[in-house]
Image (spheres, rainbow, N blue to C red):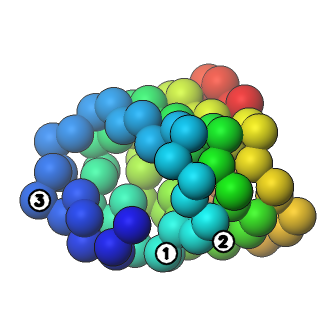
Amino acid sequence: IESDSFKKLDLLEELDLSINLLEKLDNSTFESQVNLVWLNISYNRLNFISKTLFQKLYKLKNLDISSNFIKLVENEAFLNLNILENLF
């Protein structure tokens, strides 16, 4: 996924990227999605979650990162997800 793929979709509230064989997400992939409430990136090949990947997702309530190959989640990766209700 290109880092600016969703740049103009700043009103997006739900995004399902599951089952896409994604191996990496750029730190700025979700930078413009400040209204995102639900994000599903499950069943991919992600192995790393950086501390800035979800940094601007202040409204995120549901995050599914399950069924990936995650080996490392950086400290503070979920720091700004203050209203997160479900993490899978």
* Kind of element beneath mark 3: loop
Q: CA distance from mark 3 to mark 1?
A: 17 Å
Within 10 Å of disc 3 (Cα), the crowding (few <14, some 14-19, many 20+) is few
Of all residues, the one furthest to the top in this rendering is 85
Q: Quadrant of the N terminus?
A: bottom left
The residue drawn where x is 51% and y is 47% is 20
* Amino acid type at mark 2: Ser
**Disc 3 target residue:** 8
**Residue 5: assigned label:** none
Looking at the image, residue 1 sits to the left or right of residue 39; the answer is: left
**Disc 2 target residue:** 50
Looking at the image, residue 42 sits to the left or right of residue 27; the answer is: right
Q: Position of residue 50 (x, y in %)?
A: 66, 71
The residue drawn where x is 42% and y is 35% is 16
Task: Looking at the image, tell me whether mark 3 or mark 1 is earlier in sequence order.
Answer: 3
**Disc 1 target residue:** 27
Q: CA distance from mark 1 to mark 2?
A: 7 Å
Within 10 Å of disc 1 (Cα), the crowding (few <14, some 14-19, many 20+) is some
Q: Position of residue 18 (x, y in %)?
A: 53, 38
The residue drawn where x is 62% and y is 24% is 85
